[in-house]
Image (cartoon, rainbow, N blue to C red):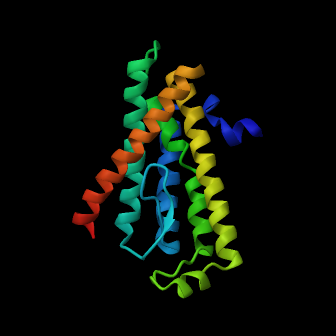
Amino acid sequence: MNTWLFNPFRYIAGSKALLIGLSAMMISAVIGYFSMSHFDGAIDFHVGKATPFHIYLTEQIIDWLCVTTAMFLSAKIWSASEIRLIDVAGTMALARWPSILAATIGFGIRINDSTSPEKLLASLTPLTIISALLSAVCMIWMIALMYNAFVVSCNMKGTRGVLAFIGSLIAAELLSKFILILAYKHLI
């Protein structure tokens, strides 16, 4: 059971993982639309204002493409193995499945957009705090899945693998933020 929760990539990779992962991202976008849950960065999750559905879908795709690109390029540079793009793309897509849970938990998070400290504090209910903590756990779980996907699909282990993963994840986060800022100007 533990393997399926944290390292399903031993059993599922390539096009099968890609199909499952893209389906999970679509489900996350649909749930996110109704819960106003945004994945506005490779590893970011926020509940925000309601926006058109295509924004939620665009966030998922851009995040995944940035992570896949960063991990693939890093593996091409640092791994001695032959790396297949379909394996990296598939496992990184599948690693995003906890976003379904985070988007669902987003229904319990309601933060007032007001700049008034009183209204902001009033929105911090026990349900909001618990939901925010649970969504953070989902995002940490997604990062753990991404690491295991990187280890399996890129054959990267040890200190070199950890450093390559961390560097790639930081690069993916920065790149996704930059692209999403540009996309928001044209999509909203």
**Which residue appears at 58% of the width and 47% of the height?**
142
Q: Is residue 157 visible?
A: no
Q: In the displayed structure, would residue 74 be above or below residue 146?
A: above
**Which residue appears at 49% of the width and 43% of the height?**
93
Q: In the displayed structure, would residue 114 be above or below residue 45?
A: below
- Quadrant containing the C terminus is bottom left
**Which residue appears at 37% of the width and 43% of the height?**
65
Which residue extends farthest front?
117
- In which quadrant of the rendered view does residue 50 lie? bottom left
Estimate the x, y position of residue 168 in percent, counting from the top left: 43, 34
Which residue extends farthest top?
80
Task: Say left or right for 122 vs 31.
Answer: right
Q: How many marks?
A: 0
**Which residue appears at 48% of the width and 55% of the height?**
44
Estimate the x, y position of residue 18 in percent, counting from the top left: 48, 40
Estimate the x, y position of residue 149 in percent, counting from the top left: 56, 33
